[in-house]
């Protein structure tokens, strides 16, 4: 799930739902569904390019590329990829800052 505390609760809830749908159609059980059906399922959650971009950015952080189909799906659904790249950079920065801390 994507954690963006600066967003209003409604948008955070949409991101949670979007994460689930994008994963289902991008990498999980529905990954073989027709592309049109997958895009429609994503857009049924939201067609906001910023929210789609935030979710795509979270998927871009995957170091193994497993989430690449999610990125492609979100981009096909209208994700703002400038937002995606910016969000991915922010997430990477937070992750690298957290590595130096003791548990």
Image (spheres, rainbow, N blue to C red):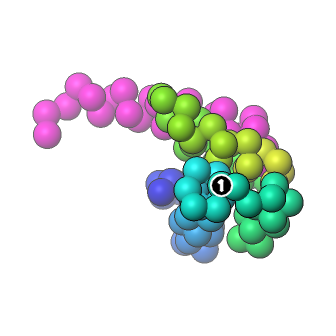
Residue at position x 41%, y 35% in the image: 94
Please, which residue is most extreme toward the front here?
Answer: 32
Residue 13 locus on image (x, y percent):
56, 71
Q: Is 101 contained in the magenta span? A: yes
Relative to 91, say whether 63 is above or below. above
Q: Is residue 22 above or below residue 67?
A: below
Q: Is residue 97 left or right of residue 43?
A: left
Query: Is residue 88 within the magenta segment?
Result: yes
Q: Nearer the viewer, residue 35 or 63?
A: 35
Residue visible at 65% across and 55% down in the picture: 31
Which residue appears at 48% of the width and 28% of the height? 63
Magenta range = 79-103
Closer to the camera, 73 or 93?
73
In the figure, is residue 70 to the left or right of 63? right
For the stretch drawn in magenta, the main secondary structure is helix
Q: Residue at x 53, y 38 (%)?
A: 66
Whether residue 47 is visible, yes or no, is: no
Q: Which residue is mark 1?
A: 31
């Amino acid at each position: 799930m994507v954690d963006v505390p600066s967003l209003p609760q409604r948008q955070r809830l949409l991101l949670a739902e979007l994460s689930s749908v994008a994963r289902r159609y991008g990498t999980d059980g529905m990954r073989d569904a027709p592309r049109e059906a997958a895009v429609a399922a994503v857009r049924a959650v939201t067609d906001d390019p910023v929210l789609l971009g935030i979710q795509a950015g979270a998927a871009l952080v995957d170091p193994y590329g497993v989430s690449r189909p999610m990125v492609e799906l979100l981009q096909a659904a209208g994700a703002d990829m400038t937002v995606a790249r910016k969000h991915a950079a922010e997430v990477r920065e937070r992750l690298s800052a957290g590595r130096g801390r003791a548990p």
